[in-house]
């Protein structure tokens, strides 16, 4: 990557544009403040702005949403055991367990394999589960080599049914009085792992993965919640039993009360595939009228509907991303708003007919843990 020292690519682009506009003498910070004010000028701010407590993980500011592909520096980041710094020269991906022969790959060997790209929306399963955490979602272009062909080449033993992905990051876990050091790990059934879309990924938005997002290699699994996309990948292990590590079996477990024949059954399910979701992102003023903009993801989005206050649901217009089940779909709807305070709710509907559940749907209200909080979101604005 070639870079002018002390200058990001984005600065270079801004500076180039500024020069063209004859503004080259304006200091950079003044200029970028001025440009972002223009971009946001017409936004009517939400009354229920999330608190800033989650800014440290770089959550998305929905009101500032403008780009369908999230720029790399805007990606939210989650690391449960900190951020390991890995030197590419010392790093190997090892594939072991129930394989025909232990194999290891250097980064150059993986980069020399067939390249594949996917634009994918990745949402943390905790998104919208607690205060301030409503922007843990991004939509980026990821590049790597298909996992399936690597597994095929290595050869899986006949009794192998489970593929476990280990990251380099480690933490101490206490299990029944034993304190043990463990690596972050997640698994998939062999069947799921053979999905030709899943990547051993080394680039995001055309550049090597930044340290925070998994350098040198991560799993990219379209259609799965964020937690399945293991960063800082060092080892893949094939096993003959389901893997029961913390992030499969104890954490990222959804506890939900299901009532069957009047009796409660507590369902505990491991967070896995993404669930349908949508949010109103921002309201803009457009001449005399207003427009509500939003995003929907987590399924093949067929339709998005919007409700103002207790009015009827109205169908929004789908924009960028429509028809691609791996990415978010942007949507908008025009709104002849009356003065005063209003509540705006969106709901997404998939091509299979799944409807994003209402906030008071038992699927949401009987869920005790905060994972998979995909109920309809209502946001408030004041129009004057
Ligand atoms: N090795 C490792 N991989 C990980 C995690 C982690 O803590 N360690 N967090 C997961 C979770 S919970 C999420 S939501 C995504 C976030 O990916 P991002 O930081 O690139 O946005 O990474 C996943 N991969
Ligand atoms: Mo997550």
Image: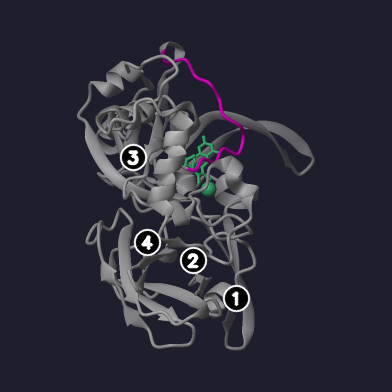
Query: According to the image, label 1 marks what residue?
Result: 365
Crowding around mark 3 (Cα neighbors within 10 Å: few <14, some 14 to 19, many 20+) is few
Mark 4 or mark 1, earlier in chain:
4
Q: Is residue 117 above or below residue 376?
A: above
Residue 86 is one of the magenta-drawn residues: yes
Q: Residue at x 53, y 21 (%)?
A: 85
Q: CA distance from mark 2 to mark 3?
A: 38 Å
- Mark 1 lies on a secondary structure that is helix
Label annotation for residue 158: 3
Q: Which residue is depicted at the point 35% across and 53% down?
A: 223
First in sequence: mark 3 or mark 4? 3
Q: Is residue 48 magenta?
A: no
Q: Are marks 2 and 1 in contact (CB under 8 Å)?
A: no
Answer whether residue 307 is visible to the viewer in this image.
yes
Return the x and y of residue 183 as percentages of the image width and height: 58, 32
Q: CA distance from mark 2 to mark 1?
A: 11 Å
Q: Residue extending furthest left?
A: 114
Q: CA distance from mark 2 to mark 4?
A: 13 Å
Q: Which residue is mark 2?
A: 374
Give the side of residue 32 with respect to residue 205, left or right: right
Looking at the image, tell me whether mark 2 or mark 1 is earlier in sequence order: 1
Percent x, y for residue 366?
A: 61, 75
Residue 116, position in %: x, y? 22, 36
In this picture, which residue range is highlighted in magenta?
76-88
Which secondary structure dominates the residues rendered in magenta?
A: loop
- Spatial CA distance of label 3 from label 4 is 43 Å
Q: Secondary structure at mark 3?
A: loop
Camera-nearest label, 2 or 3: 2
Q: Secondary structure at mark 2?
A: loop
């Amino acid at each position: 990557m070639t870079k002018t020292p002390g200058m990001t690519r984005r600065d270079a682009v801004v500076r180039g544009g500024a020069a063209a506009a004859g503004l080259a003498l304006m200091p950079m910070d003044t200029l970028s403040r001025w440009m972002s004010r223009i971009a946001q000028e017409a936004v009517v701010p939400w009354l229920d702005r999330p608190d800033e407590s989650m800014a440290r993980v770089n959550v998305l500011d929905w009101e500032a949403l403008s780009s369908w592909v999230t720029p790399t520096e805007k990606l939210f980041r989650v690391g449960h055991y900190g951020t390991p710094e890995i030197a590419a020269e010392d790093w190997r991906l090892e594939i072991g367990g129930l394989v025909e022969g232990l194999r290891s790959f250097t980064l150059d060997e993986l980069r020399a394999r067939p390249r594949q790209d996917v634009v994918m929306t990745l949402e943390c399963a905790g998104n919208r589960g607690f205060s301030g955490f409503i922007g843990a979602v991004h939509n980026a272009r990821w590049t790597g080599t298909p996992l399936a062909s690597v597994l095929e080449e290595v050869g899986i033993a006949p009794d192998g049914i489970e593929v476990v992905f280990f990251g380099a990051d480690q933490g101490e876990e206490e299990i029944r009085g034993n304190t043990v050091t463990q690596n972050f790990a997640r698994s998939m059934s062999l069947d799921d792992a053979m999905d030709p879309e899943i990547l051993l990924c080394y680039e995001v938005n055309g550049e090597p993965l930044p340290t925070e997002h998994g350098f040198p290699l991560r799993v990219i699994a379209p259609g799965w919640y964020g937690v399945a996309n293991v960063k800082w990948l060092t080892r893949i292990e094939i096993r003959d039993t389901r893997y029961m590590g913390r992030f499969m079996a104890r954490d990222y477990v959804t506890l939900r009360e299901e009532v069957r024949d009047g009796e409660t059954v507590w369902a505990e399910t491991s967070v896995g595939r993404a669930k349908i979701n949508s949010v109103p992102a921002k309201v803009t003023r457009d001449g005399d009228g207003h427009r509500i903009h939003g995003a929907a993801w987590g399924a093949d989005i067929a339709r998005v509907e919007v409700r103002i206050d207790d009015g009827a649901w109205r169908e929004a217009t789908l924009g960028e991303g429509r028809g691609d089940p791996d990415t978010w779909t942007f949507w908008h709807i025009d709104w002849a708003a009356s003065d005063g305070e209003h509540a705006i709710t969106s709901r997404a509907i998939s091509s299979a007919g799944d409807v994003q559940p209402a906030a008071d749907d038992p699927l949401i209200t009987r869920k005790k843990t905060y994972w998979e909080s995909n109920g309809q979101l209502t946001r408030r604005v004041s129009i004057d």
